[in-house]
Image (tube, helix red, strand yellow):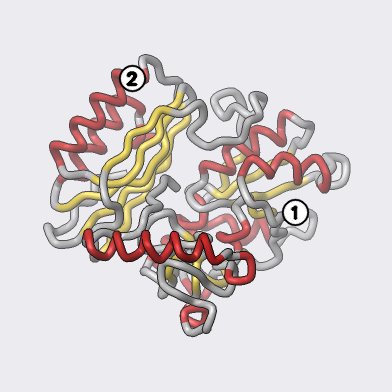
Amino acid sequence: MENKPQNNDVWTVAALYRFVTLKDLPTLQTQIRERCDDLGICGTLLIAPEGMNGTIAGQGDTIPQIIDLLDDIAGVKSGELKYSSAEEKPFRRIKVRLKKEIITMKAPEANPNDQVGTYVKPQDWNDLINDPDVTLIDTRNDYETAVGIFEGAIDPNIKTFTEFKDYVAEHMDPKKQKKVAMFCTGGIRCEKASSYMMAHGFEEVYHLQGGILKYLEDVPADQSKWNGDCFVFDRRVAVGQNLEESPYQLCYGCRFPLSPEDLESDAYEKGVSCPHCIETLSEEKAHAFRMRHEQMKKAGEGIPGDTAY
């Protein structure tokens, strides 16, 4: 994919991942962090023995420069690399973290560097999921599926990606679900999920190449089978067709994405609560959230929570 520099006022957001064997991680961490600091890059990058994953942002020609470095290290241009834009700075600072996995599943048999399902391009996705023999399943968490999902997809209602393997063990059978298609935000969770399912006897496993983000970018609205918006792991909260920002905000009490209707609820208090958490929120926690919110406002910063996609 070609570099996509933006003007100096708009923030270019690069979402990327690549499964590739990496070594000497502390040295790579230092090298990348120092270069990000020099260029004023913000966001999060995760580095593990199995590869690299992250979402970063910069202005002007800084993103092409850092992507060149990451490509030299991990070949990210040969993996999944998607660009979008944000009017305001989407992350507070840069984080370069060393992890055991770039997407946590806690299943050693799930190794995309060994085996992975069949990639399906966005323009071929509709034909696949129209097949009545295909079981379509979302690999994302419940707060993400609440914002949007494909027509006819199974929502496993998981809180974390590590629960996906439990859902498969309890609700799926390779003898019954002989064709499985899965999707996620940018494609990374599907790589792990498809590798896991193949290790457990599922033979025909497909996943959306580039994830929902690539689908929303490439498939015209009048042909789309996507309902709603797509949750993203930065301060835009959600994007829609052509990756345009959607009118969602986060509840910084429970991290649930909030629609404009949620923001009108009596249960919504900025930085504290929303309709999804008000009933379980103690007075002690509410007080702590209010204190945090006031401190962040005085400091002129956003609310904590930057993460990789």
Distance of label 1 from label 2 (alpha carbons): 43 Å
Q: Position of residue 250 (x, y in %)?
A: 45, 65
**Residue type of the residue flagged with mark 2:** Pro
User: In which quadrant will I find the N terminus?
Assistant: top left
> As rendered, which of 267 and 70 lies closer to the eye?
267
Horizontal side of residue 142 vs 197, given as left or right: left
Query: What's the residue at 24%, 32% (across, down)?
Result: 33
Q: Position of residue 165 (x, y in %)?
A: 71, 39
Horizontal side of residue 289 vs 224, given as left or right: left
Which labelled disc corresponds to residue 26? 2
Which labelled disc corresponds to residue 134? 1
Query: What's the residue at 82%, 48% (across, down)?
Result: 171
Q: Tag 1, which secondary structure?
A: strand
Q: Tag 2, which secondary structure?
A: helix
Res 192 quadrant in image? top right
> As rendered, which of 251 and 41 lies closer to the eye?
251
